Image (cartoon, rainbow, N blue to C red):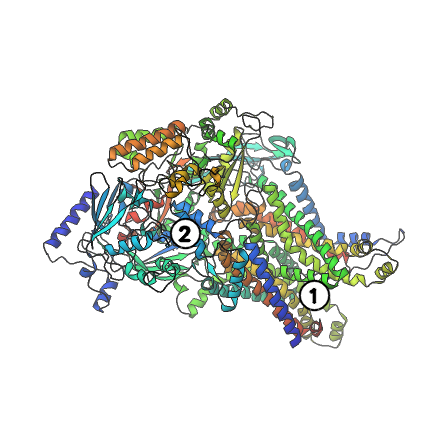
Amino acid sequence: MADIAVNLEPSPQVPIDQDRSSLTQWQLTWRRFLRNRLAVAGGIILIIFYVVMVIFPGFFSPYSHVVQREDFMSAPPQLPRWVDENGTFHWRPFVYGFTTELDMEKFEWVHTIDTSQKYPIYFIVRGELYRLLGFIPCEIHIFGVEPPGTFFLFGTDELGRDLFSRILHGGQVSLTVGLVGVILTIILGSVMGTISGYYGGIIDNLIQRLVELLMSFPDIPLWAALSAALPPEWSPAKRFFAISAILSLRNWTGLARQVRAKILAYREEDYALAAQAMGASDRRIILVHLLPNAASHIIVVATLSIPGMILAETALSFLGLGIQPPVVSWGVLLQHAQEVAVVLDRPWLLLPGVFVVLAVLSFNFLGDGLRDAADPYSN
Amino acid sequence: MRRLVRFLTGSLLIVLLAGGAAFAYNEAPMLAEKVKAGLLPPVEERLPENPLVVEPLESIGKYGGTWVKWTTNREWAYVKMMMYGYSPIRWVDDGLGIEPNWIESWESNEDATVWTFRIRKGVRWSDGHPLTTKDIMFWWEDMALNPEMSDPVPDLFISGGQQAVFEALDDYTLQIRYVAPAPLLPERLCMWPSGCNHGERLIVPAHYLKQFHPDYSDYENFEVFEEKMEWWFNPECPVLTEWMPVEHEPARRLVLERNPYYYAVDPEGNQLPYIDRIEANYVEDLEVIKLKLLNGEADMQVRPYVALSDLAMLKRNEVNGGYKVYLWDSGSGTGPIYYTNWNHPDPAKQELYRKPEFRRALSHAINRQRIQRMLFFNLGEITTGTFSPKAIEFHRTEEGRELYRQWRDAYVEYNPEKAAQLLDSIGVIDKDGDGWRDFPDGSPLSVRIDHDAVINKTDQQTNEMVKADWEAVGIRTILNPVDSSAMQMLDQTATFDIRDSWELGDGPNHIVFPQWIVPIDLSRWAPLYGAWYSVQGTAEAELELDLPPRDRTPPREQPVPGGPVDRLQKLYDLAKVEPDLETRERLVFEMIKIHIEDGPFFIGTVADYPRIVVVNEKMKNVPDEDQLALGGFVNPWIMVYPAITHPATFYYDN
Amino acid sequence: MAAFISRRLISMLITLALVSVVGFIVINLPPGSYLDVYRAQLMVLGTSTADQQIKALEQRYALDRPLYYQYFKWITGFVRGDFGRSFQYNREVSELVWARIGFTVVVSLCSLIFSWAVAIPIGIYSATHKYSGADNLFTFLSFIGLSIPSFLIALVLMVISSRVFGVSVGGLFSRAYEHAPWSWAKFVDFLQHLWIPVVVVGLADTAGLVRVMRGNLSDILSMQYVQTARAKGLPERVVIYKHAVRNALHPLIMNLGMSLPGIISGSTVVSIVLSLPTCGPLYFNALRSQDMFLAGTFLVFMAIMLVIGNFLADIALALVDPRIRYE
């Protein structure tokens, strides 16, 4: 997780007449952004992720993420097919069922595909009960098969839980931790950076010392120490927010430094001096003149730090210090997959890693794209 | 039968020796060299007059080889459990019997208040110094009885509320006198060998440690003494074990070499052990150890335990890796265990937990077949939760066997309807319609399973399955992972709710280590009552009685007279001083009946599942499960696996 | 220059002092102490003697004294090289720490060198062949490298190394060579074990460096003086290396300081998976057992490595860019 020095100098906002032949700063930015296809792709993926995983995980998962099924332990992924064993094409995709046997010689569960069991995949079906948006009981899922058929798109884990559903629900936690952490980072970083840059003097010095102090700690060891201190009786929700807070505790320093540099620069600009001369209060100067110019910068830096938070959450959960089971997050899922036997025999359990990579990649592309779009002179 | 053979062989040796026959002992080549170089006395002088004779499982072995071990335990506890040499007496046959180790014989008077032990003449410490009763008396007088030294007087030397009296009748004869019978003294001397457990010693190398003892040296306190005493960290400290530490790198590795003064031989007079060296390497992560097992880089491993889910992978690789996989029984009485806090701080919960209907409902709600199928490959047996099925009381008589079955099956049936009925019958129903059952008075009810944050996979999975089962009958269940130190506080202050903890694996008989069956200390299912018992007969018993139970030190409370705990404690009081075996067993049966009738006090899932043992195929004399007396009894620390399988007789056949 | 250095040194010391205080406090935040953990372990063994021993241990470790007393005793020992006592191992922390710090430095340094050695050539190639197939591939790979959780790759690589190549894994040496004197064979064995942690830890950093290098270099390549140099007829290679790359290295050196935290903490997580004899595994265990002096010492040492690394980077930068010296 290397921090990249961000070199950003947006020009101050100058209001322009709403003439059709000229565009505002933001419109220009937007257009530039759209030209960067990777960034757009990243953005789209993220929107999909957030809608599917954070807002409606229950609907998009074919199954509950906690129900254990003793007949389907460690089942490999069931892929949807369109052509059956006789070569016939079906419009409606289907999956083959399988039979399960316990091999007492080899001590493993053997799942054999049974081509005589064909289960067509239906869309918008009734399935297991969940709570839409957390409180509305609902049974509708986006796809599924009729029982006793099963459709484990990514296979199951050792307790027979559908991995695809668990990935979606885990994404809800991992993506939200990142988001909450970043919001906290933005708030802390902007406030501290602004105060530091604007008021200067002793306050600046103190804050700088604090920043330096925090940056002298290697991040994971510091997070580990703080997480180890969380009282055990805290509920998973409380723990969740505490982890986000801990993660942002070190992150805000980077943003604060950047904001401080910006504020220092803008403070001396003409329009700021003019506002001061006119008697505008400090607060007004900061909020109305200085911060908005730094806003795009802040957003970019924030976006680029989300990947770090997501990866940090997975690392902490892997160490057993982050999100704890039975709450599911990508980090928790990867911790369960952290075994030789998984890599050798049940590799589909490593799929949450792919989602982590996708999410992080998308945030990186998006952040890059935003930065390039906001500053046409950087490249 | 095997014991008979051993006895005969041993006697034969004694006869030959006594007859002055020119019976030559043999020794390992590496020692023979040292003898030639004058560094060691010849083997006849190193062995005692009457050495221990150990019969190898299959064949007489060859000397040589290095036993490579990988461990995740920084105190080398798993290495200590491979060696039995330090123990005065040893278990044999999975706990069915006991036999002399460096103590040659013992006897007691009729009521078991006076015990006399005879040490083998000529047994020496690993540096050659003779072992005598002086070493025992040094421990007793200068350590155990010394108020400034942290070693306490172990419980096995207290009977009738008073400490025993030690007397060395001569250099090789020790007498221990109690005021009340102590019938199980020899059995208790078999537990915790090799100083495995801090504080419960009998003997230390006095000639070495005296120089660090404050009373005999310039040292002001015991800090250096205690450090030097830890022989598994300090290679200079003489030992009695089969192999002695020669090199120690903290948290990296421990190298042990054969003890030239180890006091045992095989039936042909070859001094044991066969294997020259043990190399124990510390590794951080269990997964790395699994890779090493797959690659055949480990020679014989029992611990750290590998979960059954990895069995397929290990078996598949047997040929390539050059090893065999054995499955030794764990002897666990419960498998993953759950017990309610009999002394719960919340009065409403305490009342609820004391109702047998509630606990039975919890038990009937658990689908043990499913757990057995999913996590244990249908091995082991489902159980309500009992003392180890290998315990001797469950084997000696038909009555014992029957009682085990009764206890095991008492509340084992998976019957959610019955569970629901039981809950309904005590008023635990859903009053506010939120889908969860409530207390009889209507307040919301939830149970919390407190477990260690660092938990093994099988326990984690069982927790999740049990949670699903209990919620299916309407009891809201929260899984609460707790870090070590915080867990300690929950235990010490008796504020846990439902605890999932280390399993009940204890044995081999119910009285030597009865903590699970009768609360006698702050641990386990009735902490405050157990703590009360632990101070009886000491000065503290009469103090602090005006304070509320939880404010006392230690927090303790008198058991309700006539209640199950009180009855169990009274039975235990009788049993532990009962010299007659059958009467004692009868008392144990009474205690078990209380568990059956008023229990379950702890809830088990799958008992006696197998443990994976990986053995290099070149290593011989390692028993498989059919060659073990009871099929294995791996779990309990006091049972000392694999030391009980005579690792001194393992050898490499290249 | 000397003034610059001495100023930085002083501020370094102050920072480290503060780090030790904060670190010590943080490590002692969990309720209870090592003795509770120890007692838990004794409990499992079922000993009936816990209380007495605990009292004796409390006195021996001075755990009955307040925290600030502990801190002072500990921090003043630093000067003498006495870092307190580890409870778990019942020995001096210094015995446990030195060897591991050595290996941590080796792994971190090698990862750093690896990432630079790989990133710079790739970055140069990417910048000079912008938007070519290879460039796109490298960009893509860089991004992937930035995104994968390190412990996952570590495990996968370890399994591949063990099952496919038959190399003994775990630690930095095979058992045979661990205590043997240094030789060519031992060195080869060391490399066979070293490559996984170095690659895994360095991966994210490599990826970042490639992108920065590419970005900076392409910036410079479009600048006036480069065009001038080309117009002067200088061979392309000279243009690139003598003029452009040199200038592109400035921000890279500045980034060096920023790479270090990632490398040091990355190596802690990876060390656990690969069971390396470095700070990481011991540190996390010490945290869990509240072995406060051991954990605290490790934390301070990791911070020291970070701070010194930054310091060296600053000096390098000052050497290269005179403006910095007058800050």
SS type, badge 1: helix
Up-down: is B13 above or below B354?
Answer: below
Q: Which amino acid does label 1 sit on?
A: Asn
In the picture, the disc for residue B294 is: 2
Judged left or right of residue A28, residue A183 is left
The quarter holding residue C7 reads bottom right
Question: Where's residue B26, x and y in %?
Answer: 19, 59
Judged left or right of residue B127, residue C285 is right
Along the line of sight, the residue nearer the viewer: A78 or B306: B306
Compute the Cα span from label 2 to label 1.
48 Å
- Total tally of numbered discs in the picture: 2
Quadrant location of the C terminus of chain C in the rendered image: bottom right
Question: Where's residue B66, x and y in %?
Answer: 32, 58
Q: Can residue C308 be seen in this view?
A: yes
* Residue at (9% x, 54% y) in the render: B19
Judged left or right of residue C268, residue B199 is left
Q: Which amino acid does label 2 sit on?
A: Leu
Judged left or right of residue A187, residue B285 is left
Please say if the residues under marks 2 and 1 sit with CB atoms less than 8 Å apart: no
Disc 2: which chain?
B
Along the line of sight, the residue nearer the viewer: C135 or C148: C148
Up-down: is A216 above or below A116?
Answer: below
SS type, badge 2: helix
Q: Can residue C121 be seen in this view?
A: no
Classify mark 1: residues with Cα within 10 Å, few (<14), some (14-19) or many (20+): many
Question: Where's residue C275, x and y in %?
Answer: 47, 57
Disc 1: which chain?
C
Quadrant location of the N terminus of chain C in the rendered image: bottom right
In the picture, the disc for residue C216 is: 1
